[in-house]
Image (tube, rainbow, N blue to C red):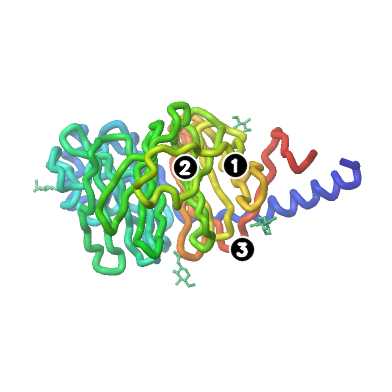
């Protein structure tokens, strides 16, 4: 590249970098619930069933004026699915409201398979239904819930799977023949397909060396739709056709390697309507993006100097109906605030420069 082009290019990058505007919506020093009474909170703190310092957001979905989070922890987390409003006059330490209610969670009722046990991946479909993966427990199989957000949060346990544990993320494929969910489990060499119309689920196996972590789907407007798979302990991204999964006849697929992120373990990937894919990585202080209409090329989307490198999953990412991006950031344990919720407004998305990393378009 000529020095002249290089100067132009750097100028362009700095313009782009300043164009990305992340507005802070909330910050939390500590996560806490809206408890029925202070006595419940005190009791749970004392008996160790509630350990606020152990809780962290793992999945997020946004619909209308509500934001939903699945919380992860090894223990000490009474309720794993909560909601907060998308805006409030008070931006510090908003309380998390158990969703859809305290009563639909297994807190104090462990082993009740009709309750939400361990909420994982979240998605909202085009008619305002929140799909919630639930990993189950040693007593209960993994499950799928559908909560109708525009109909009084009517909640239905839609399916019980034949397996338990390791539920991670899902994407939805709304077709003329009904809605399908494609589900990834932590590090498993398969994806789970669920057909809503027939209320059936089955596994589709990838080769043993392709252990899947994250899953993303190309925009609905595009046919054939593609599924993208992020590989466990790897930078690699693979793709397969969504259509081959719908019939239920295909039980083995050979995903195609399409590229590599700059960082390993892309635990969360998602694609907006413009076809830009975003990804977050284990123990990494950045999120990256790729324009899926172009050959694979990772760009920095956001780098956060406070993102905790002691956090396994420092970010959660979601898109709302207006195509704004929502991001939670977890900081190091010793820091305050410990968590922040950021929003990138529509039309203000662009890529920053990923420092110190080579970019193929520079060559
Ligand atoms: C709160 O405490 C009351 C009284 O002990 C109890 O009946 C109720 O189940 C508790 N609720 C929660 C969510 O802990
Ligand atoms: C999307 O935009 C509409 C119209 O401006 C607004 O009413 C709605 O609250 C927005 N949704 C979100 C999640 O911000
Ligand atoms: C992605 O790439 C395509 C093809 O080069 C281009 O037309 C489109 O504007 C790009 N999208 C974004 C969001 O930059
Ligand atoms: C992100 O982490 C890397 C180390 O992995 C560090 O070199 C870099 O400075 C960090 N970025 C920011 C903005 O703090």
Query: Vertically, is 261 above or below 64?
Result: above
Whether disc 2's CB lies below 8 Å from ligand 4 is answered: no
| x and y, in percent, of residue 20 in the image | 63, 54
Query: Is 297 positioned to the left or the right of 26 in the image?
Result: right
| x and y, in percent, of residue 299 in the image | 65, 44
Looking at marks 3 and 2 on the same chain, the residue that comes earlier in the sequence is marked by 2
Q: State the quadrant of the C terminus.
A: top right
For residue 311, the mark is none
Dot 1, crowdedness within 10 Å: few (<14), some or many (≥20)? some
User: In terms of image quadrants, where is residue 190?
Assistant: top left
Rendered residue at 21%/57% (across/down): 156
Dot 2, crowdedness within 10 Å: few (<14), some or many (≥20)? many
User: In terms of image quadrants, where is residue 30?
Assistant: top left
| x and y, in percent, of residue 44 in the image | 19, 38
Looking at marks 3 and 1 on the same chain, the residue that comes earlier in the sequence is marked by 1
Residue nearest the observer in this picture, 113 or 205: 205
Which residue is under mark 2? 268
Whether disc 1's CB lies below 8 Å from ligand 4 is answered: yes
Which residue is under mark 1? 303
Q: CA distance from mark 3 to mark 2?
A: 22 Å
């Amino acid at each position: 590249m000529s020095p002249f082009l290089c100067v132009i290019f750097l100028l362009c990058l700095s313009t782009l970098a300043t164009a990305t505007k992340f507005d802070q919506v909330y910050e939390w020093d500590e996560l806490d619930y809206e408890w029925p009474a202070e006595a419940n909170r005190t009791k749970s703190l004392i008996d160790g069933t509630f350990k606020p310092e152990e809780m962290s957001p793992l999945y997020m979905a946004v619909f209308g004026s509500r934001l939903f989070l699945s919380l992860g922890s090894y223990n000490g987390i009474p309720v794993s699915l909560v909601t907060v409003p998308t805006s409030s006059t008070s931006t510090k330490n908003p309380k998390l409201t158990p969703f859809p209610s305290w009563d639909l969670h297994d807190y104090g009722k462990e082993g009740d398979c009709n309750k939400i046990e361990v909420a994982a991946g979240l998605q909202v479909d085009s008619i305002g239904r929140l799909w919630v993966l639930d990993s189950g427990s040693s007593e209960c199989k993994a499950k799928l819930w559908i909560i109708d957000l525009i109909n009084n949060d009517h909640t239905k346990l839609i399916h019980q799977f034949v397996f338990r544990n390791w539920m991670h993320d899902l994407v939805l494929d709304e077709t003329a023949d009904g809605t399908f969910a494609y589900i990834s489990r932590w590090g498993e060499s398969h994806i789970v397909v669920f057909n809503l119309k027939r209320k059936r689920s089955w596994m589709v196996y990838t080769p043993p060396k392709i252990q899947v972590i994250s899953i993303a789907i190309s925009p609905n407007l595009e046919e054939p739709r593609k599924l993208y798979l992020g590989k466990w302990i790897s930078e690699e991204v693979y793709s397969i056709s969504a259509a081959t999964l719908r019939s239920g006849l295909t039980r083995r697929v050979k995903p195609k390697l399409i590229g590599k992120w700059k960082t390993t373990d892309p635990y969360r990937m998602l694609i907006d309507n413009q076809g830009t894919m975003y990804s977050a990585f284990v123990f990494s202080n950045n999120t990256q993006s790729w324009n899926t209409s172009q050959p694979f090329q990772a760009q920095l989307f956001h780098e956060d100097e406070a993102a905790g490198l002691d956090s396994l999953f420092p970010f959660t990412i979601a898109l709302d109906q207006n195509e704004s991006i929502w991001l939670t950031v977890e900081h190091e344990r010793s820091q305050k605030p410990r968590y922040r919720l950021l929003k990138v407004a529509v039309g203000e998305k662009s890529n920053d420069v990923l420092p110190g990393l080579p970019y193929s378009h520079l060559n």
